[in-house]
Image: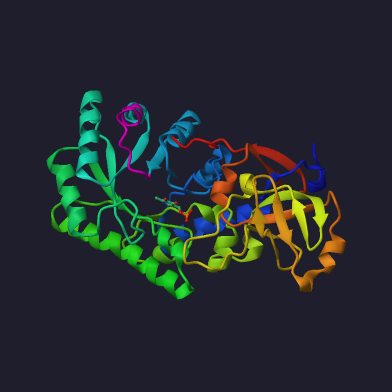
């Protein structure tokens, strides 16, 4: 058994288990604080073991983004799954409708044309799919507009007997570009209101809406406060990252995921580590959010950042005021890097090393790595 971070070959993906556990409890605390359910997103950790832990801690189900993530969970005995992406491919839909006969799968719908595909495939298999309408609360990605357009699609689903419409959901991903906590408050309010006013409009039209689901890591704790919201779907909050620290959603001490790297070269005014775009990504945060510096923060060394990346190289340029660091950091020394965005970084590794609370290091597979179809 590897006993110390220094013994690991790098770059390696490290979870600090104590911090992750605290984050999981923070995530789940909205259940008691605000009386809402939690359906965490799998896309961040892509780990069956962590998803099961979230269910043990009280999550009502798991959210996924792709058909293959859903199939992975089903293969591992997780059966309450929201596929929060509008599937249109008949092969994927038909495969999942078949598997849904023995599970509880919920599908995202955002247009009549897509709903018609679900109706046809459901009829072929003689199943009634459970459906949630995706509502656009300002991210301007997928989703029908709140209220009128939502009622229109809900009416179509009901009239055409496409399936069982049981919920509305939205994701305020534009909160990542917020310039202040006040702006996140406002976006969270709009996120909740987009769903609540749309659900009321549907109910006024005689279509009951049982589930009203919102959530992104910057907004889920805020949006959970609004009466009538039934659940939240945080993903990133299992780990947090430099973007969340920049947004003020988390403190640096709460970040639970790092990339361990090695100093491989020292040159004038800079040193080079073995983590580049293939292990840190080139993510810089949402457009308009200036809070993230470089491509990752070197932890425990003051204000030091990975200032440039190529695929396997991370270049750390040393600011004049920190020149002593160049002397201090030796070849082969390990450094921990806080990624800007944890979710796509995880997808670049086969497994994590989990630093247990007792100091042991154990491996944990990134089961959903590459499950992008
Ligand atoms: C539909 C949906 N729900 C929830 C989430 C979770 O968001 P976050 O990772 O910010 O918590 C995402 C993330 O992209 C998403 O697309």
Query: What residue do we see at 47% from left, 60% from top?
Result: 30
The front one of 268 and 277 is: 268
Q: Is residue 79 above or below residue 327?
A: above
**Colour mode?**
rainbow
Q: Nearer the viewer, residue 201 or 344?
A: 344
172 shown above or below 321: above
Image coordinates for residue 192, horizontal then vertical, percent: 34, 63
On screen, residue 332 versus residue 364, left or right, reads: right
Check the picture and name the quadrant holding the C terminus: top left
Q: Residue at x 62, y 44 (%)?
A: 278
Residue pictured at 80% horizontal, 36% vertical: 1
Count the marks.
0
Q: Is residue 50 visible?
A: yes
From this viewpoint, is residue 227 visible? no
364 within the magenta span? no
Is 94 part of what is drawn in magenta?
yes
The picture quadrant where one finds residue 191 is: bottom left
Q: Position of residue 32 (x, y in %)?
A: 46, 60
x then y, percent, for residue 332 = 84, 48
Residue 191, placed above or below residue 69:
below
Which stretch appears magenta?
84-95
For the view shown, which residue lies furthest in the front direction?
Answer: 268
- Whether 248 is drawn above or below 159: the answer is below
Q: Is residue 312 left or right of residue 328?
A: left
Q: Locate residue 97, reporting x and y percent.
A: 32, 30
Q: Specify whether 125 is left or right of 60.
A: left
Q: Which of the 4 image quarters holds residue 113?
A: top left
């Amino acid at each position: 058994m590897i006993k110390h971070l220094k013994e690991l070959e790098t770059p390696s993906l490290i979870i600090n288990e104590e911090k992750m556990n605290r984050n999981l409890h923070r995530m789940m605390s909205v259940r008691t604080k605000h009386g809402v359910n939690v359906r965490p997103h799998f896309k961040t950790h892509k780990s069956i073991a962590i998803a099961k832990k979230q269910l043990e801690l009280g999550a009502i189900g798991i959210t996924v983004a792709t058909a293959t993530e859903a199939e992975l969970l089903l293969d591992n005995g997780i059966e309450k799954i929201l596929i929060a992406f509008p599937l249109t491919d008949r092969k994927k839909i038909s495969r999942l409708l078949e598997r849904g006969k023995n599970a509880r799968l919920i599908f995202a719908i955002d247009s009549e044309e897509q709903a018609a595909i679900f109706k046809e495939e459901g009829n072929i298999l003689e199943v009634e799919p459970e459906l949630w309408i995706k509502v656009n609360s300002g991210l301007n990605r997928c989703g029908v507009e709140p209220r009128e357009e939502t009622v229109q699609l809900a009416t179509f689903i009901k009239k055409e007997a496409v399936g069982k419409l049981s919920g509305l959901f939205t994701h305020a991903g534009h909160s990542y570009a917020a310039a202040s906590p006040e702006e996140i408050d406002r976006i969270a309010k709009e996120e909740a209101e987009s769903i609540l006013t749309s659900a009321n409009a549907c109910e006024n039209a005689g279509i009951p809406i049982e589930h009203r689901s919102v959530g992104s890591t910057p907004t889920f704790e805020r949006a959970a406060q609004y009466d009538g919201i039934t659940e939240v779907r945080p993903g990133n909050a299992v780990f947090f990252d430099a973007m969340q620290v920049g947004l003020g959603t988390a403190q640096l001490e709460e970040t639970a995921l790092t990339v361990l790297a090695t100093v491989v070269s020292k040159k004038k005014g800079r040193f080079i580590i073995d983590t580049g775009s293939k292990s840190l990504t080139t993510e810089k945060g949402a457009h308009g959010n200036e809070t993230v510096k470089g491509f990752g923060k070197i932890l425990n060394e003051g204000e030091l950042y990975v200032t440039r990346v190529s695929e396997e190289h991370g270049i750390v340029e040393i600011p004049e005021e920190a020149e002593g660091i160049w002397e201090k950091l030796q070849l082969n020394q390990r450094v921990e890097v806080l990624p800007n965005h944890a979710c796509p970084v995880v997808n670049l590794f086969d497994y994590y090393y989990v630093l247990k609370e007792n100091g042991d290091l154990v491996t944990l597979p990134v089961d959903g790595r590459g499950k992008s179809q």
